[in-house]
Amino acid sequence: MNKLKPHTRTRAQESTGAIEKLYITMRHLFNRGFYKPMGVSGESLRESLLTLRPEIYGSITDDKIELQGLLYVMDRLPYGIEECRFINLTSDEGYKNSHFEPIIPLKRRRNCYRIDSEQINIEITRGRSEIYDILTHLTFLFIESHKIMKQVLINENGEVIRDWKKLEHAVLKKDKLTQEEKEVALTHTANFLGRTFEEVKNVFPYFANEKDENRFFNIIYFLGKLAIDEVIADNKRIITFSPVLRERLGHHIHGEQWAYRIKHTLQEKNLLERPLHIISANMHSVMNSLYAPKALPAEFLNKKQMEVFEALSSPVNLKLREKVTKTALAEGMTFIEDVSGTNIDVQIIDTAKIKKSPYTEGLKNVEDSQKPVIVVMDYAFGEQAYETMDELLKPLIDADKKRHFLNVASVSIMGKAGILEGGKGDIMIPSAHVFEGTADNYPFKNQMGKSLFKDDNVKVFTGTMISVLGTSLQNREVLKFFHNSTWNVIGLEMEGAHYQKAIQAASKIRRSISPKVKVRYAYYASDNPLETGSTLASGGLGTTGVKPTYLITEKMLKQILDNSKN
């Protein structure tokens, strides 16, 4: 009788287990109310992250400091967080009406408040995905801080190496550092970071901001200092979750307020019964596609269309963007700036008021009362996509308790995602969404197709998209498994399954919208996490993302507006 061979876990299985353990642990710590990241209570998070070794965090398991991963994390956490022992995650609890100045991270739209020299508060208004995002980044940050501590601490009496003292002198100096002093400090810092002078010098300016050009020194110093305090004086850093946050999470408080304001605005403008087409995208491509040719005739005459769109995407061309916005506001666009805390702004576009656009030529013989209304919502974040879409698709209940159902004709989702075959700027058209870590899968009929892009000189991939629990937790082994297996996964993102869950619930279970609602999904690649040097931590898309963004927008608008029955 043949004996069964003992099963050896693959790296993909180990990584999947680590991801599941991370999320179970984070939920437990949230329910508990507080924990010490580098203490016993944070041990499970640290071990899981080190087992997982996510691509975005690079050399997290090495002795040398991971510079690109550190930059990625610091762009998404509030300025000055490295100095704080106490990090408090709160709900929207009224700090905006206080003397505290909001601190908004460079790459994440969330309000944070520096309470005193030791404490910073981070407002959570976008659901569990935001908590997972922050805790993962903080775990990485504190692991790196202890790597610094191990390199600079000589003994248990608190003695430190000479290189550390030189960095401390540079950080605590009140006068501005000269170029010579800066390079001396960089030399000493590079020594204990395990990096070359060139590596440290090259990354140094990317950490700078308008408040502090030497922010890199401050980050390294205080990360190391607080780690030393944890070891020598047992002054552990603590992360807490406010009671109000724990009470409110999952109750759609922000999403409900957000959706009501949109539906109330539609009602005020007599648009509630018109065919509605919801687009989850950015706040520029739909507006620019519809209004820029009229607002900027000279630019479109002298340049190719995509060159104008690239110019509009540049922050230096503020006047060009203002011209387009002015035309849009005069011809049917209403802008709703978010005040609910979702951080999702909205544009409502009444196509009956667009005076001249090639997109609306097919609507000439359609009565104004039947012309489409486009609701463009900015990107949601992870699970927040379910909360916002679920609330938006519910009927409006007015003051007289009367229900007004929305005439939703289509829902279109455009986003950026990681691609598993191809590169930055390529396009992905999904046929289904699979939700990572669960048995949930959402096949659907996608109105977008590969054939739409056949003349556009762009690579297009079709297949399954995986909606991940967090992009910062993905590693090569897990992604290879999904890509090479019969799941036929072409890319990863964070919102698709959540949107589809809300759409299917509204159309097939609640019947609050038509079961014939048309659905469109298309993504453009922001990175390829299977390629070394092509992860999100390697930098942004730049102008590479302009072409696929506007091509997808063009196809979506043509499908919405070329046929009034669509």
Image (cartoon, rainbow, N blue to C red):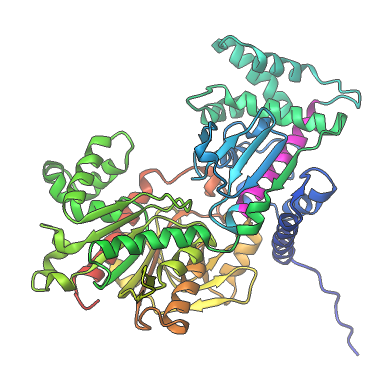
- Location of the C terminus (image quadrant): bottom left
- Residue in the image at 35% along x and 45% along y: 543
Q: Is residue 104 above or below residue 212?
A: below
* Residue placed most toward the observer, 215 or 459: 215
Answer whether residue 58 is visible to the viewer in this image: no
Q: Using the rendered view, name the quadrant where residue 389 is placed.
A: bottom left
Instruction: Give the quarter of the image for residue 332.
Output: bottom left
Residue 92 percent coordinates (x, y): 55, 48
Q: In this view, does 130 lie above or below 234?
A: below
Q: Nearer the viewer, residue 148 or 425?
A: 148
Q: Is residue 320 visible?
A: yes
Side of 189 relative to 234 (left or right)? left
**Magenta stretch: dominant secondary structure:** helix
Write down the region rendered in magenta.
131-152
Is residue 524 depicted above or below 539 in this figure? below
Coordinates of residue 129 in the picture (x, y in percent): 59, 57
* In the foreground, 457 or 278: 278
- Verify whether residue 132 appears in magenta: yes
> In which quadrant of the rendered image does the N terminus lie?
bottom right
> Hey, which residue is sitting farthest bottom in the picture?
1
Is 464 on the left-hand or right-hand side of 361? right
Between residue 549 and residue 219, name the one nearer to us: 219
- Residue 462 against residue 313 in the figure, above or below: below
